[in-house]
């Protein structure tokens, strides 16, 4: 359903996270491979491994390593190794560098000033010399920090050429919290990222699943929510977000 909606919209290429772990093993990626073969003449599909079980547990690491061999882009989810996120990123980025692949990392998903995952990620990108090869996904918690801190992180992101993928519908329902922070929406702060010179692309998440049963892969809906929610109406920039930036974050 999601892929067909994207084809209707003229999407040229898409990166999709595929679960590869001790529960699903390689079943999902084998099914996805059949789908990619079916649509290969209509759309370029790049696979990314989703590390839902983290990468530090021995069983999880086994399936991460196996998945890394078969995908086009290495995927990470540091929050699944809570308290050891730096180790998670070391494994993720060293694997991507060794395999000469890009990395896409879900980060700062809880819209909380207690998270500083984007800063950690960008420092690890610099440490592993992976400039221009990594994209952060979501980074909601950036907006929950004071402006001075946000500007510091944007500067580091420019230095590391860290790209950003915003998936607005996925987190518009961010839970209420009593934690104090600057007033902000639960959206990636695209209105600050794009003017700061950060490459921003649009994505969609949780298509017709238990988390988002009504999400249908319509990228215009995500783009529309993003531009209205961030009050970002720079048409030329929005066109880049919806077109060439999406290709760039996929390494195309």
Image (tube, rainbow, N blue to C red):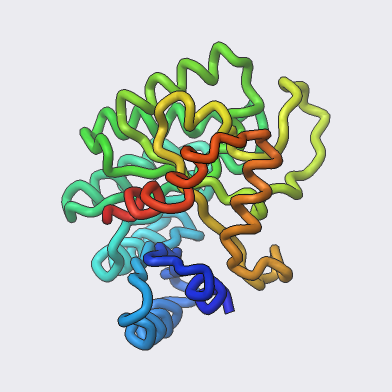
From the viewer's perspective, is residue 151 above or below residue 42? above
Q: Position of residue 137 (x, y in %)?
A: 49, 46
Figure quadrant of residue 222: bottom right
Identify which residue is drawn at 36% across, 70% down. 45
From the viewer's perspective, is residue 237 above or below residue 39? above
Q: Which of 121 and 199 is in front in this view?
A: 199
Figure quadrant of residue 126: top left
Q: Position of residue 190 (x, y in %)?
A: 55, 35
Asked if residue 115 shows in the view, the reply is yes
Q: Nearer the viewer, residue 210 or 225?
A: 225
Identify which residue is drawn at 59% across, 67% down. 217
- Left or right, 189 with respect to 102, comes to right
Identify which residue is drawn at 46% across, 22% down. 153
Can you say which quadrant of the picture contains the C terminus?
A: bottom left
Q: Nearer the viewer, residue 182 or 59?
A: 182
Q: Where is residue 47 in the image (x, y as percent from the top left)?
A: 36, 67
From the viewer's perspective, is residue 37 above or below residue 156? below
Can you say which quadrant of the picture contains the N terminus?
A: bottom right
- Name of the residue lying farthest toward the top: 148
Number of numbered markers: 0
- Left or right, 177 with respect to 113, comes to right
Identify which residue is drawn at 39% across, 39% down. 163
- Left or right, 118 with respect to 91, comes to right
Asked if residue 30 shows in the view, the reply is no
Q: Position of residue 82 (x, y in %)?
A: 53, 42
């Amino acid at each position: 359903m999601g892929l067909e909606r994207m084809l209707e919209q003229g999407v040229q290429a898409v990166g999709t996270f595929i679960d590869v772990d001790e529960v699903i093993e390689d079943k999902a990626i084998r099914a996805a491979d059949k789908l990619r073969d079916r649509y290969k003449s209509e759309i370029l599909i790049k696979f990314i491994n989703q590390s839902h079980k983290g990468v530090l547990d021995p069983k999880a690491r086994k399936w991460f390593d196996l998945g890394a061999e078969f995908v086009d882009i290495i995927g990470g989810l540091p929050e699944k190794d809570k308290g050891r996120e730096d180790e998670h990123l070391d494994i993720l980025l060293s694997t991507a560098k060794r395999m000469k692949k890009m990395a896409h990392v879900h980060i700062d998903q809880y819209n909380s000033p207690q998270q500083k995952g984007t800063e950690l990620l960008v420092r690890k990108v610099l440490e592993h010399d992976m400039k221009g090869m990594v994209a952060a996904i979501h980074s909601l918690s950036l907006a929950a920090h004071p402006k001075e801190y946000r500007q510091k992180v944007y500067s580091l992101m420019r230095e590391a050429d860290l790209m950003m993928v915003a998936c607005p519908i996925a987190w518009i329902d961010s839970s209420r919290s009593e934690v104090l922070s600057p007033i902000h929406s639960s959206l990636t702060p695209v209105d600050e990222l794009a003017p700061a010179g950060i490459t921003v692309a649009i994505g969609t998440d949780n298509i017709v699943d238990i988390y988002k049963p009504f999400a249908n892969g319509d990228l215009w809906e995500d783009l529309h929510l993003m531009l209205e929610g961030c009050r970002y109406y720079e048409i030329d920039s929005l066109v880049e977000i919806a077109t060439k930036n999406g290709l760039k974050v996929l390494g195309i």
